[in-house]
Image (cartoon, grey):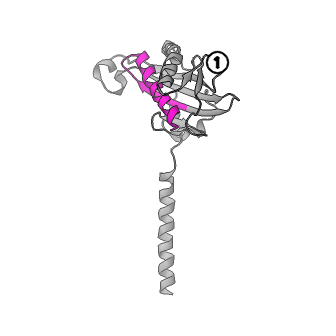
Amino acid sequence: MVRYANRMFWLAVAALLLVGVTPALAEKRFTSSDDAKERDEPQKFLPDYEKLVGGKDADWVYFPGGALKAKTVSVKEFDYNGHGRECRDAARDGKDYMEQWLEKQGYQIVKSGGEVTIEGNVFNAWEPSGGARYWGGWAANPGVGMEVIAKDAKGNVVAEVRHKAKGSTMRDAVENGLEDVAKALAKGH
């Protein structure tokens, strides 16, 4: 009887440990993050924000089939659903920088008819305000938040990425961010 009680005790301890550790091992989802609670960052571009998980090169990623295996990629002009001139200006630079960084990852860029089509969106862009430029810290540089969706020739989603980046200028922030996004697309994480 003592052996049975001892075994049950250790089985109960193991079960409690397993229950306590399992949530820590689960991937963090975008929808349960602080990023998802930002009021000035719309979530209207990507088809399913629930599928986004923490990425390595980019902040939030979803790759149903792993890295992009396509050889040819078409990039559409970027859109924006954030407010203000900064978002509009950041979106203008998106297509060119996305093409540049995808080429550096080994993809061939074609005007249309690529095996994968990339669409982009700027959901937020900001310039430092007032004293932030002089006091330093995270708010001292311009930044941009962008989303990218990749679809195959049939229109199926093969990747979703949401990422924020900073730079010395707004254009630099867009370039830095899309460099990270292109790396994430090529690696699949």
Residue located 38% across and 21% down the image:
167
Residue located 47% across and 57% down the image:
21
Q: Position of residue 9 (x, y in %)?
A: 48, 75
What range of the chain is rendered magenta? 161-189
Which residue in the rendered view is the most extreme toward the bottom?
Answer: 1
The dominant secondary structure in magenta is helix
Is residue 66 toward the left or the right of residue 139 in the image?
right
Report whether residue 184 is seen: yes
Res 160 → quadrant: top right
| Pick the front one: 135 or 22 | 22
Which type of secondary structure does the marked residue at label 1 adopt?
loop
Which residue in the rendered view is the most extreme toward the left?
Answer: 135
| Pick the front one: 33 or 163 | 163
Q: Position of residue 38 (x, y in %)?
A: 50, 31
Residue located 32% across and 27% down the image:
137
Q: Position of residue 71 (x, y in %)?
A: 58, 28
Q: Position of residue 13 (x, y in %)?
A: 47, 69
- Say if the magenta span includes residue 185: yes
Disc 1: which residue: 112
